[in-house]
Image (cartoon, helix red, strand yellow):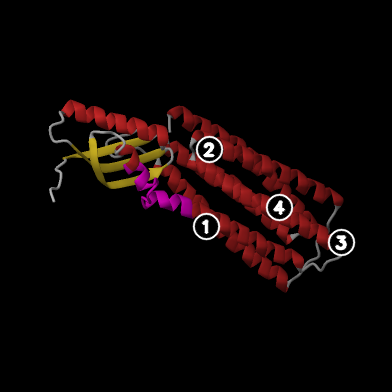
Amino acid sequence: MATDNFKKVKQVLWIILFANLAVAVLKIIIGSTIKSASMTADGFHSLSDASSNIVGLIGIQYASKPVDEDHPYGHRKFETLAGLFIASMLFVVSGKIILGAIDRFMNPIIPNITLESLILLLVTLSINIFVCVFEYRKGKKLNSRILISDSMHTKSDIYVSIGVLVTLISIRLGLPPVIDPIASLIVAVFIIHAAYEIFRDNSEVLVDKAVVDTEKIRTIAQSFEQVKDTHNIRSRGCEYDLHIDMHIMIEPDMSVKESHELILNIQEKICEEVDGNVQIIAHLEPYREVIR
C-alpha cells in the first residue's frame, strides 16, 4: 500500500470514528432512558466500533512505516494484527452482553418505549448503513484490510439495530418484556459471528494461507515458450501485499539477461491477470527432457 493510501485510510478512520461515537452515545442514552437492555447492548456494540477505529488508527500508523533493516518485508502486518485485536474486543463485548442479558432474565425490567426513542434509533441505523457502505467501498478502493474488517464489524451493527428496533416495537405492541434480554442474546450472537469472520480473515494472512490458485500461476508462467516446466509454486500475503515464489525450468543455454527478462515478463503478466501488487521470487533450473 502506497504512503498516500495509508493517509487516505487514516482519514476514513477518523471520519468513521466520530460517526460511531455519535451513534454509540445516542443509543446508550436512549437505552438507559427507556431501560432497554437490548438497545443499551447495541450502544456498547457501537462504542466498540469506535474503539476499533482507534485500534485501526494505531495499526495503520505502524503499518505505514517504510522497510527497514529489522523489517525487510515492511510493517504491513501491523494492520493485520490490528484486525485481530478488533476481533478480540468484540469477543469481550459479546461476553458482557450475555452476562447482562442473564441478569435481565433474573431481574426483568419493562422498557419505557417512546416514539422519540424509536425515531432516534432509526437515525442511528441510517448512520450505521452509511458508515458500513462508505467504509467497505473505501477499503476495497484503497486495498485496506483494516477498513474492510471494520466495515464487517459495522455491518453486524446494522442487523443488530434492526433486531433491537423490531424488539422495541414488539414490546410496545404488547409482547412480554422477556423479549428484550432475548434480543440482547441475539445481539451477542451477531457480534460473535462478526468477531469470528474478522479473526478468520486476518489470521489467514499471519499463517501464510495460499492466496492465489497454483494452477493459474502455472498456466501463466507456462504460456511463455521459454518456460518448460514450473513447480513448487507458493503464495502468501493478501490482495495488496501478495508474494509468490516458484521454480521455473528453462532451456539450459539461456543467458542471464534472457532469463532475467523472462522473469520480468512473467511478473508483468501475473500483475495484469492476478494482482498488481505481486512480488515474485523465481528459482531458475535448467530443463532436461526425460528420454523414455
**Are there few (<14), some (14-19), or many (20+) residues within 10 Å of tag 4?**
many
Mark 3, other Cα within 10 Å: few <14 / some 14–19 / many ≥20: few
Disc 1 to disc 4, C-alpha distance: 19 Å
Q: Report the Cα–Cα distance between label 1 and label 2.
A: 20 Å
Q: Which residues are magenta?
A: 200-218
User: What is the spatial separation of the Cα atoms under label 2 and label 4, in whole angstroms?
Assistant: 25 Å
Q: Position of residue 19 (x, y in %)?
A: 65, 39
The residue at which mark 3 appears reads as 173
Residue where numbered disc 4 is placed: 161
User: Looking at the image, which residue is at 24% across and 37% down?
Assistant: 227
Q: Residues within 10 Å of mark 2 (few under 14, many from 20)?
A: some
246 and 250: which is toward the camera: 250
Mark 3 and mark 2: Cα distance apart in space: 42 Å
What's the residue at 86%, 65% (across, down)?
174
Q: Is residue 208 shown left or right of residue 13? A: left
**Residue 14 visible at all:** yes
- CA–CA distance between discs 3 and 1? 35 Å
Judged by depth in the image, the label closer to the viewer, 2 or 4, is 2
Check the image and name the residue furthest to the front.
Answer: 292
Are discs 2 and 4 less than 8 Å apart at CB? Answer: no
Which badge, 1 or 2, comes first in the chain's sequence? 2
Is residue 275 located in the magenta-colored stretch of the structure?
no
- Left/right of residue 35 with respect to residue 194 in the rendered view: right
**Residue 239, numbered circle:** none
The image quadrant of residue 98 is bottom right
Q: Is residue 208 magenta?
A: yes
Local SS, label 4: helix
Q: Nearer the viewer, mark 1 or mark 2?
A: 2
Name which of mark 4 and mark 3 comes first in the sequence: 4
- Residue pointed to by mark 1: 196
Task: Count residues near mark 1 (Cα–Cα under 10 Å), then give few for <14, some for 14-19, many for 20+.
Answer: some
* Residue type highlighted by circle 1: Tyr
